[in-house]
Amino acid sequence: MRVLSDAFIPELPNAYRGKVRENYDLPDGNRIIIATDRLSAFDRILTSIPDKGHILTQTARYWFEATKDICPNHVVAYPDPNVVIGKRLDILPVEIVVRGYLAGTTGTSLLTLYKKGERNMYGLHLPDGLKDNQILLQPVITPTSKAFDGSHDEPLTPQEIIDHKLLTAEQWETLSRYALALFARGQELAAKRGLILVDTKYEFGTDETGKIILADEIHTPDSSRYWIADGYDEAFRAGSRPKSFDKDFIRAWVVERCDPYKDDIPEIPAELVEETAEVYRTAYETITGETFIPDQSGETVLDRIRTNLAPYFNVR
């Protein structure tokens, strides 16, 4: 299998290694972002999934192109299927999550909080009587930020964001407008592919002039929840989870066999890796309407990337 587990390139300047992406800051104010095939969960790397980095980069590319009329994004160029050259930004300290349904499993999701009996959250009020996975009257923004001790994400209201000076009132208005418009475009295009865009997260930053720009990724299977539209109504009536691009085979397999936060992770079976890879390929083709064709050039994926990034070597 052609797998990109590591993308360290010593000829590139100012390296920074993330959980999934390798980053290199260029002197011209841009950043090279290489999406590897690493799969991260439980704050650690579990394995690598063939074509994952390629698929996430190109899925985001599809959406950046489809939404560039709504707000500016960080994209400068795509020199390789796994690589985006992006404008280097100061990332704003609020994560924007837009939700169209009462869904989710994390501690900050609407459904989790709603099941705990909370009705007022994120500056919103939800009525009694809502059911799991029910569509909301309109999409809502559920912003979070790291707790002030830096330990975990915590829900925020718009007023708290402004009072704590995480964003100015003008920045919050701009982020809200961008996020809701992006989500509306995402739901519109997803529906044409037989999909429901349930919720998604956005990351924004500012450039040297203070202009707000969309960063990171957009509407990928890793940053968004998609359901298959056909069958949603039946699943909702039955109280079951709608069919989705379920990539959590590996996460569930690990949890059944160890405490992933404390124990060594057992070797992931090859068939499980391939099953997950197939889900990513199917997601790409369904979301974009394009056939996924892996790039087989170069002896390895890293060799291909090195060739395509050679013009950026040894710049200082």
Image (spheres, helix red, strand yellow):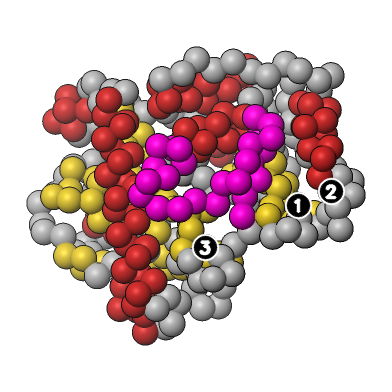
Q: Which mark is residue 189?
A: none
Residue 246 location (% of width, % of height)? 44, 29
First in sequence: mark 3 vs mark 1: 1
Residue 40 in the image: above or below residue 315: above
Q: Residues within 10 Å of mark 1 (few under 14, many from 20)?
A: some
Q: Is residue 130 left or right of residue 153?
A: left
Q: Report how far apart the C-alphas of labels 3 and 2 lie in the structure.
A: 24 Å
Q: Amino acid at mark 1?
A: Tyr
- Give percent across and percent down for residue 77: 63, 41
Q: Residue at x 43, y 25 (%)?
A: 288
Residue 55: horizontal and vertical position, in percent? Answer: 57, 29
Residue at 23% in and 21% down: 230
Disc 1, SS = strand
The residue identified by callout 2 is 12
Q: Residues within 10 Å of mark 2 (few under 14, many from 20)?
A: many
Query: Which is nearer the eye, 227 or 7?
Result: 7
Residue 140 vs residue 14, the one in the foreground: 14
Q: Quadrant of the N terminus?
A: top right
- Say if 15 sits above or below 309 in the image: below
- State the SS at label 2: loop
- Magenta span: 63-87
The residue that appears at 66% across and 45% down in the rendered structure is 85
Q: CA gap, disc 2 to disc 1?
A: 6 Å
Q: Are marks 2 and 1 in contact (CB under 8 Å)?
A: yes
Q: Amino acid at mark 3?
A: Gly
Q: Secondary structure at mark 3?
A: strand
Residue 94 is at least partly visible in this image:
yes
Residue 98 in the magenta stretch? The answer is no
**What residue is disc 3 on?**
205
